Amino acid sequence: MYRTALRNVLAHKGRLLMTALAVMLGTAFVAGTLVFSDTMGQAVRNSYSKSYSDVSVLVSDKWSRSAENGPKAAGEKKREALTDATVKDFAALPGVERARGVVTGFTAVADKKGNLIGEAWSAQGSNFAPDASGQDSRYPMVQGRGPKAAGEIALNKQAADKAGYQVGDKVRVAGNGAAEDTTLTGVFTSDDPQVTSGGTLVLMDTATAQQRLLEAGHYSSIALTAKSGVAESALLDAAKAKLPADVFDLETGQQLKDEQSEMVTRSVTGMKSMLLVFAGISLFVGIFIIVNTFTMLIAQRLKELALLRAVGASRRQVTNSVLVEALMIGVIASVSGLLLGIGIGAGMQSLLAGVNEGMPTGSLVIAPATVIGTLVTGIVVTVLSALIPAIRASRIPPVAAMSSGDLPSTQRGLVVRNSIGTLLAGGGIALILLGAFSKGSGGRTYLELGAPVTLIGVFVLLPLLSRPVVALVGPLLGKVFGTPGKLARRNAVRNPRRTASTAAALTIGLTLVTAVTVIGNSVTSTVTRLVAGSMKADYTVSMANHDEVARELAPVIAKANGVTAASPVGNVMWTMAGDRKAVQGFDAAAFDQLVKVDMTSGSTGALKQGQILVNDEFAGKHQLHQGSTLKLEVDGGKTVDLTVGGVFERNDALSPVIASNTLIDQYDSDSFVTEILVKGKDGATPALKQAVKEATGSNPVIQVLTEKDKVDEFSRIITTMLNIMYGLLGMAVLVAVLGVINTLAMSVFERKREIGMLRAIGLDRRGIKRMVRIESVVISLFGALIGVGLGCFLAWAAIRVLAADLNGLTTAVPYGSVALFLLLAALVGIIAALWPARRASRMDILSSIKTD
Amino acid sequence: MSTSTAYAAHTGLAAARATGLNKVYGEGDTRVVALDNVSVSFGQGEFTAIMGPSGSGKSTLMHCMAGLDTVSSGSATIGETELVGLKDKQLTKLRRDKIGFVFQAFNLLPTLTALENITLPMDIAGRKVDKAWLDRVVETVGLSGRLSHRPAQLSGGQQQRVACARALASKPEIIFADEPTGNLDSRSGAEILSFLRNSVRELGQTVVMVTHDPVAASYADRVVFLADGRIVDELTNPTADSVLDRMRRFDAKGRTS
C-alpha cells in the first residue's frame, strides 16, 4: 500500500503542488515567527547584558525616575535624596571599588532644522562623570572630549551622525523647560541600552545635569562597583544598612540583569504569541485546502480505489494509503516551510535593522523547539486534515470499480450538515446578540464565545449559502458575459461543498480584515467626533514625550503676537468618599474663550468666584445641583468644601469636575499641566503657530497642535496598526488564493471532456478562459461577501461591547474600504484563475473528448 | 464495386471533401501513417458511414475533416471553405457555425438542462434560436416532455438524443457523429440511428458517421471502408449483411496478402 501511496504522490505532483505550498506557507510563518522572536530576544538580551557589567549594586531614587509621569499621587512630598554625601558614604564602604552618582532624565536634541532627533520616548540625558584621567569608562569618546561646563554637551555617535553634527557645532537641546543652545564637545559610543536600542543620549557635566534634569546636588541613582572578590549580595546588605528603609530601591547587578532579561522575554513572548495567532490563522486556512485537495483527488481516483478494494484491500489499507500520501506531503511541505521560515526570520531581522539602525542584531537562533514545533505542526495539520477524506475513501464500495461512464459527483444529502450549521450559527449569533445587548462586563464573554461558534456555523452552512448568494449575481453574469458567464455560474454552484471550502479560506481572511477595519474606523471616527468641537482653542501646546508642560510658558505664550487667550490645563486627583476623582483646572478668565461647554444650569463665570463646575452625569450620580456643596479630600489629606457653581453637559474632552487653576493651586501645589490651550485673534494660522513656537523657545519637544493634528496623529496610529494587521492577515489571504488556484486547476482537470466538447462545438479559447475566470471570481466574491458581512456583524457586536468602556463609541462602517475589499477579492479571483484558465484554454480537443 | 464518384443523393454537391489527405504521427521509427492519400467527398443530404477496423484511421479522417485535428498534407473542405491553413480562431468559428457533433460519450454539460444543452451552440455564437425549427427538432427526437431535465435525470439513449438535437438545432452544413451508438444498448442505439437517418431523409441534413458496427452502418445511404489509412471500398444502400460480407472479404484479403 505504501508503494501505491508513493506512486500516487509522484503521479499527482502538479495537483498536490498547491496543497504543499499552502502547508509550506503556514509552517514558514510559524518557523519565521519563532526564529525571528528568538533571535530578537537573544540580541536584545545580549545588548542589555553588557549594560550592567560594572554595576554590582544600584541604588535608585524611586521618585526621580523620569518614567514617573502623570499627576502625582497625594502624599508624595519631600523625601530623602541621593546626594554627593550619599555617594561619598557609599564610596567609603568596605568592598566598594567605585561609587558613581548617576543623573538621568528626559533630554531632547534638535537637528539642524530644529526638529527632534529620534522619538521623544527614547530621548535621554545623563551626566558625564570623568575619573582622574578625564575619561568616563562608560562613555568612551570617539571624537572630542566630554562636557566640562554648562553649555557643553556630548552626543552619542548615531544621533550625531543622523543630524550631521561635528564637534564644535551648536546643538539645541531641551528638557521639560526651555530649550538651550549648547556646544558639542564630544561624540561617544556606549553599550548603554539607551544608546544600543536606538535612542538619543545627551551627556552634560554632573552639575548641569542635576540642575536640568533633577535638583541641584541630587542624583537619580548611584551605581556601586564591588572590589573583586566581594559578593554583590554582601555589598547590597552593607548599602542597605546605610540608608533609611523603603525610600530607595536597591538591587544587585544580577537582579537588574535578570529583571531586564525577564522584561525582554516578556515582550518577545508577547510579540511571538501575537504572530503565532496569525500563523495559526494561515494554517487554519490551509486546512480547507488540504481537505479540498484530498476530497477531489479521491473523487478522481474513485475507480482506482474501488479496484483496490475489489482485489482485496481492506478499508483500513485504503484509509492508510491516503494518510501516507498526506504524511509525505506534510513532511515535504513542513521541511521546506521550516527552511523558508528560517529565511524569513533572517530577512525580518535585517529588514528591521535596516529600518531602525539602533536595532540590536545577533546571530540567527534556531532553537530545537522551533524545528520540532514547526515540523510537528505542519505534519499533524496535514495528516489530520486528510483524515476525513481518507475515511470517505475507505467507504467507496468495491462495485464502483465496475460502473462505467461519467462519475456523478456524489451529492450526499446536506441535510445533516445544514442542520448542524444552522444550530451552530444560530446559537453563535444568539450569543453575540446577547453579548451586544447585555450591560456590563458579561457581554465580552458572550461575544468571545459566540464569535468562533458563529464562524464555524457559517462555514458549515457555506454550501447551502452558495446557491442563493451566487444566484444573486447569476442573471447579471449571463447578460454581461454571455454563455461563458452562464456556464461559469452553473459551474460555481455545481459542487457546493467544493465551492464552499474554497470560498471559506477567503471568508476567514475577509472576516478578520473587515472586522479590524470596521473597529479601527469606528474608533477613529468616534475620536474625531469627540475631539472635534469640544474646544474653542486653536492650538494646544504639549510635550512630545507626554511630560508635564512648564506652566510658566502660559503667560509667555499669552503675550505672543496674535494670541488672545492662553491657559494651562492643570490636572489633580482628589479623593471623594475614598474614590479618586480627576479634577481639571483652567484659568478662569480665559475659560470661555478656550473651552466649549453647554451649561444646563449656572454659568461658567462661577469659576471666577472660586466655585466648581460638574458635568450632568456626575451631578446626577452624586445628587448635586447649582449651589450644593461637594466635599473633597485634597492633597495632604485635608477636606475642603467646594460650591457647585454650575452643571454642564457631559463632554468627553473634559473631566467631570472643573475648577480654576487658582482654586486648585490653593490646595495642591503639584497639579500636572498636560497642555496649554491657546486662542488666536485670527484662528489657527501658521503665523500664530510660529509665534507660539518662538515664544516657547523653539523647543523640539514642544508640540503646537490643532485639534485636527491630534486627530490625524491618532488616526495615523490606528492606520499603522491596521496596516500591520493587513500584513499579517495577508499570508492567510495568500494561502486562500492558492486554494482557489488549486480548486480551479482540479476542476478544469475533471471537466476536461466538457471543455473539449465546448471547444469542439465552437467555444473559442477566449470563451473557455473567460468561463474559468468568471467561475473563479464568483467563488472569490462569494467567500468575500460572506466574510465582509460576518466581519461587519462581529465588529458591530464588539463595538457595542467595547462601548461599555469607551464612552460614545459607535459603529462606523467604512464603505469605501469594504467596497475595496470586494474589488480586491474579485481581483484575487482573476489572478487565481490565470494559470487554470490558460491550462483549460490550451487543452487539446481530441485528447480531451476521447473516452477511456 | 460501385464507383467512387459517390452518388450525391439530392443535389450532387459535396458538403465536405477531402483531397489527397495525409496524416502522419511521429517520426523515424515511431512514424505512423494514419491517413494515406485519402480522397473522399460527402454529398449534401447524404448519410455516410465510415467503417473500418480499429486503427484503420476512420476517426482520424473524421477529426481532420471536422477541423478538430490538423492534417500533414492534402486538403479538406467544408462546403466552400478550405480547412487546411485556418487558424484556431477561424476553425472554432467554422465548427460553431457549420458543423454539428455527436460523440460516443454523451458529452452534455451536466449543469445545463436538456433544452439549454440543445441551444448551447447558438448561445455560444450569440445567434437567435429559430423557434419553429427547434420545436420540430425536439419533436423529432421525442424529447418534448424532458426539456427541463438535467442530463443526470436522463437515460443514456435520451442523453444521446439530446446530443443529436443539439447537433441539428443550429442547422449545420454537416453533422459528424463519432460512434454515436457505442455506449448504448441495441434498442437505444436503433432509435438514435433511425433518428439520424430521418434527419437526413426528412430534414435534408448531411450526416457523416464513424462506426465499426455493421448494423449501424446499414442505416446509412453509403458506406466508405477504410483500412490502414486508405479508402479500400465503398457500398451504397447497404444492409447489415452486405456490410458484414465486405468486412469479411477485407479480413480474408488481409490474411492472404
Image (cartoon, rainbow, N blue to C red):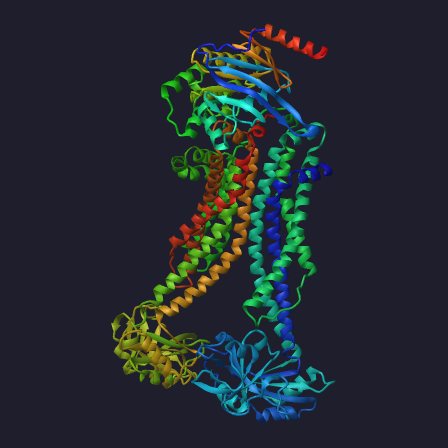
Quadrant of the snapshot with the N terminus of chain A: top right
Residue A394 percent location from the top left of the image: 65, 34
Q: Horizontal and vertical percent for residue A102?
A: 57, 86
In this image, A760 relative to A16: left or right? Answer: left
Q: Quadrant of the C terminus of chain A?
A: top right
The answer to which of A686 and A291 lies nearer the viewer is A686
Residue A439 occupies which quadrant of the picture?
bottom left
Is residue A319 left or right of A634 when viewed as pictured?
right
Q: Is residue A104 visible?
A: yes
* Percent position of residue B140, x then y: 43, 14
Foreground residue among A319 and A664? A319
The number of numbered badges drawn on the structure is 0
In depth, the one of A543 and A515 nearer the eye is A543
Query: Which residue is found at the position 61% from the left and 66% from the top?
Result: A40
Q: Position of residue A400 (x, y in %)?
A: 63, 27
Q: Relative to B137, is A661 above or below?
A: below
The residue shown at (59%, 29%) is A847
Residue A627 visible somewhere in the drawing: no
Residue A49, compared with residue A237, is above or below; it is above
User: Camera-side residue: A522 or A633?
Assistant: A522
Against B124, residue A156 (above or below) is: below
